[in-house]
Image: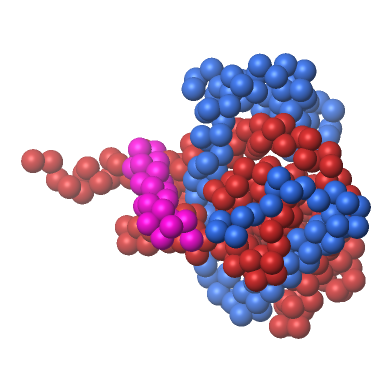
Chain colours: A red, B blue
Amino acid sequence: MTDPLLIWSYLSEGPLLWLTATLVAYLIGDAAFRATHRKSWANPVLIAVVVLGLLLWGTGTDYATYFEGAQFVHFMLGPATVALGLPLYDNLPRVRKAAWPMLAGLVVGSSVAVLSALAIAKAFGIQGSVLASLAPKSTTAPVAIGIAERIGGQPTLTAALVLLTGIFGAIIVTPLLNALRIRDWRARGFSVGVAAHGIGTARAFQVNETAGAFSGIGMGLNAVLTAIIAPLALRLFGG
Amino acid sequence: MIATLAIILSFQLVGEIAARALDLPLPGPVVGLLLLVATCILRPSVAERIRPTTLGLLQHLSLFFVPAGVGIVAHWGLLREYGLGLALALAGSTVLAIGAGALAFTAVARLTRSEDPSAMKAPGDD
C-alpha cells in the first residue's frame, strides 16, 4: 500500500482537494440552513468558512494553497454578478416605480454605513490605515479594495472586513427589519444590498426574488456612492 | 445549462472589454449585467432561454463567497489586534445602515405614493 503521506503530498499539490472541500463545506452549511428552517443565523457562508478554516488549521495548509483549488468557485462571482441582470429585468416595472424610495434608501444607508463605522472605530482609538480600510466595508469586495487603496487603507484587511460585514448583515437583516415592522420586500432587499453587498444579496435571494433584485441594485449603486463618500468621510474623521 | 453559461460568460467578456477599453468606473461584470438587461428588453426570448440555469445559479450565490470568506481566517491575527473596536464598528454600522436605509426607503415610498402592494411580506414569511 502507498504511504498515506505520499497520497497527502500529491493531493495537497493539486486543486482537487480544496475545490471538493469548498463544495462539501458549502453543502454542509446549506444543509444546516435548511435544517433550521432557513433561519438567518445558520448562514451557509459562515458555516462553510468555519468548517474550512478548521480544516486548514488542522492540516497546516496556508491560504494560498487553499485558494489554488478554491479559485474555480471564486471565479463564479463574475458570472453570478452578470446573472443578477435577469431578476433585475424581471423586476423592471417595480424598479421604475421605486426610483425616489431607492434614492432615499441609498443616500441614507450608504452615508450611515460609512459615517457610523468611522465614528465608532474612532471612539475606540482606531486610526490611520486601519480606519481607511474600514471606510468602504459595506461595498462589494473588488470595489472596496480599489477604494481602500486610494485612501490609504490595507487591501487585505479591507477584504476581510467586507466579508465580515456581509455575513453579519445577512444574519441580522431578518430579525432587525421584522422588529422595525418593515414589510416592503423592496425596502428589505435594497437596504441589505446597500449595507451588506453580495452576501446580503445572497440572503435576500434565499427569501424572496423581488428582495434579491432590489438588493442587487442597492449593492451596485452603493459601490458608486461609497467611492465618493468614503474619502470625504475619512477626511472628516481625520483618518 | 452549457448554453446559458456560454451566454453569461460572453456578457461578462464583453463587459470586461468595454470597461477597460472605455475606462469605465464600473467593474466588467457590472457592465455585463447592464448589457444583459438591455438585451433582455430588446429580445425577451433571451430571458426565457437563460432563466432556469440563471435562477438556479443565484439560489447558490452564497457559495461563490466562500473562498474569499476563508481569507478572514488568514487575517485572523490582524483582526484580533483591533478586535473590539472593529467588531463594534462593523456590527453597529451595519445595524444602523440597514435600519436607516429601509426606513428611509419606506418613508419616501409613502410620501411619493409609490408603495407596491404586490411586494409586501406576508405575516408568516421569514
The residue that appears at 59% across and 67% down in the rendered structure is A175
Residue B26: horizontal and vertical position, in percent? 79, 38
Q: Is residue A37 left or right of residue A84?
A: left
Residue A187: percent from the left, percent from the top?
A: 74, 55
For this rendering, which residue is in front, B77 or A38? A38
Q: Magenta part of the protein: which range? A: A15-39
Report the quarter where the N terminus of chain A lies: top left
Observer able to see residue A56: no
Nearer to the camera, A185 or A42: A185
Quadrant position of residue A116: bottom right
Q: Position of residue A131 (x, y in %)?
A: 75, 70
Q: Quadrant of the C terminus of chain A?
A: bottom right
Q: Is residue B120 left or right of residue A73?
A: right
Prevailing secondary structure of the magenta residues: helix
Task: Residue at 55%, 43% (x, y): give it.
Answer: B61
Which residue: 91% across, 57% down?
B111
| Nearer to us in this view, A3 or B4 | B4
Residue A72 left/right relative to B107: left
The mark tally for this picture is 0
* B23 within the magenta span: no
Query: Residue A206, relative to residue A60: is it above or below?
Result: above
User: Is B74 situated above or below B29?
Assistant: below
**Quarter of the rendering containing residue A29:** bottom left
Residue located 56% across and 39% down the image: B58
x, y percentage for residue A158?
67, 59
Is residue A30 rendered magenta in the image?
Answer: yes
